[in-house]
Image (cartoon, grey):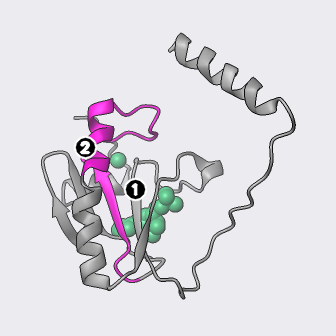
Amino acid sequence: MPRDPDCVFCKIVVAEIPAAVVYENESIISFLDVNPLAEGHLLVIPREHYSSVLDIPPTQCGALFSVAPTLGRALMEVTGAEGFNVLLNDGRAAGQVVSHVHCHLVPRRADDDLGYRWNAKKYSPGRDAELTAAYQKAFAQQ
Ligand code: AMP
Ligand code: ZN
């Protein structure tokens, strides 16, 4: 199984360091984020070490997200949240600090102070069509 001896999440997988584990199955482990954005903030990680979604086999990627309904229901019940964000930071520029693929499940309330910037923009005329063609070409080459 892919493992990085220096990775903090790999150490959690083999119980070399402690974590507040709330759920696990043969593919994933979920535990409390030690520095939560809100009480009950969960992390879900694959047991295998992959730095990026670009490296993870589709079955493992599926396993990671397949627990979202189970975890999300428990999160809503336990925290009394009104909703939750599922977030995956991939790459340093996207805010990834721990280089072991992980999803955040962050409990939300309408009146919480978390916020985030969602500075939506408009496409200039024709640019959306150019990008659609570029995506279709990229998928055809994969
Ligand atoms: P990211 O910025 O997406 O890489 O998030 C990494 C998250 O891992 C942060 O929210 C940290 O608080 C959390 N974290 C780091 N080390 C631990 C640990 N030993 N146990 C639980 N959560 C951790
Ligand atoms: Zn790891």
15 vs 127, left or right, is left
SS type, badge 2 = helix
Residue carrying label 2? 63
Residue carrying label 1? 103
121 vs 1, left or right, is right
- Pick out the residue farthest to the left: 26
Taking 142 as reference, is 103 above or below it?
below
Q: Position of residue 140 (x, y in %)?
A: 54, 12
State the residue in front, 18 or 136.
136
Is the C-beta of the residue carrying label 1 under 8 Å from the nearest atom of ligand 1? Answer: no
User: Dot 2: within a 10 Å radius of its alpha carbon, few (fewer than 14), some, or many (20 or more) residues?
Assistant: some
User: Dot 1: within a 10 Å radius of its alpha carbon, few (fewer than 14), some, or many (20 or more) residues?
Assistant: many
State the residue in front, 107 or 123.
123
Q: Amino acid at mark 2?
A: Ala
63 vs 116, left or right, is left
Q: Magenta stretch containing residue 58, yes or no? A: yes
- Pick out the residue farthest to the right: 124
Residue at the image point whose x is 40% and y is 47% from the top: 101
Q: Position of residue 74 (x, y in %)?
A: 23, 73
* Residues drawn in magenta: 39-66
Residue at the image point whose x is 38% and y is 83% from the top: 39
Residue at the image point whose x is 57% and y is 79% from the top: 114
